[in-house]
Amino acid sequence: MSQLPERYRTAIAPLIDKARELLEQGEELVPMAFVGNFATGATIPTALVMRSPADKDAAARAVKLLAEQLDADFVFVLMEAYSLRADKVARYEEILDEYGSLADCPASWRIDVVSLSLETRHGVWVAQVPVRPKGISKKKRTIGAPEFRHYTDVQGRFTDLLPVKEGEGGPSGTLH
C-alpha cells in the first residue's frame, strides 16, 4: 500500500475535518467534489447531484470540465454511502442482483460510511470510514481518521477526471 503523499494529505485534511464537524452537528453530508490546483492554490468545491444514473453521469462530466478549466492536480470526492458488513461482502453481487442497490437491501446488512476518493495523476487513493453515533444523540454522528489505499487501475464514472499535463503520464503515472 502506497502512502498518501503529504502534499495531498495537507490539501484534503481540512475538507475531511469539515465533513466530520458537519456530522457532529447532526447534519447530512452533501456529495461534493473538490477540484484543486497546487500552482494557484485554488480548490473549487462543487456539489454532486446523485439521484439517478443520468445525474451521476452529468456530475462526472461537470467535474471533468472544471478540472480541465482549472488545470487541476487533484479531484477529491466526498460523500455518505452504504457499505456491506464484513460478513455480507462476499454476497455483494448477489445482493445487488436481488435488491438493485445497497440502499434497498436490509438495513441490518449495511453500514453507513463516508466514502473518500482522491484522484491524482499517480493513481487514486480511496477510503471508506464508518459513520458512528456521537455520544447518546440520535442525530449527531462522527467518523474516525481515514486510512487511504492506493490504486493505479480503477474504473467508473468518477475516474479519469483530471486533464493530462504535457510531459506527464495519465492517471496511473508513477509517483516519485
Image: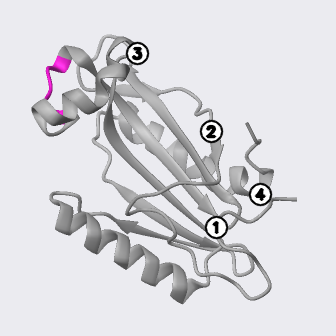
Q: Is residue 105 magenta?
A: yes
Type of the residue with mark 3: Ala
Q: Earlier in the sequence, mark 2 or mark 3?
A: 3
Magenta segment boundaries in residue numbering: 103-107
The one nearer the camera, 3 or 30, is: 3
Q: Earlier in the sequence, mark 3 or mark 4?
A: 4
Report the disc number at residue 147: none
Cα gap from disc 1 to disc 2, whole angstroms: 17 Å
The one nearer the camera, 154 or 21, is: 154
Vertical placement of 75 versus 89: above or below?
A: below
Cα gap from disc 4 to disc 1, whole angstroms: 17 Å
The answer to whether residue 115 is seen in the rendering is yes
Left/right placement of residue 46 relative to residue 12 reads left
Residue at image mark 4: 7
Q: Say what secondary structure mark 3 lies in.
A: helix
Cα gap from disc 2 to disc 4, whole angstroms: 14 Å
Type of the residue with mark 4: Arg
Residue at image mark 1: 171
Q: Earlier in the sequence, mark 2 or mark 4?
A: 4
Residue 52 x/y as whole percent: 15, 59
Cα gap from disc 3 to disc 1, whole angstroms: 30 Å
Residue at image mark 2: 148
Q: Earlier in the sequence, mark 3 or mark 1?
A: 3
Residue at image mark 3: 86
Type of the residue with mark 1: Pro
Left/right placement of residue 176 relative to residue 154 reads right
Q: Earlier in the sequence, mark 1 or mark 2?
A: 2
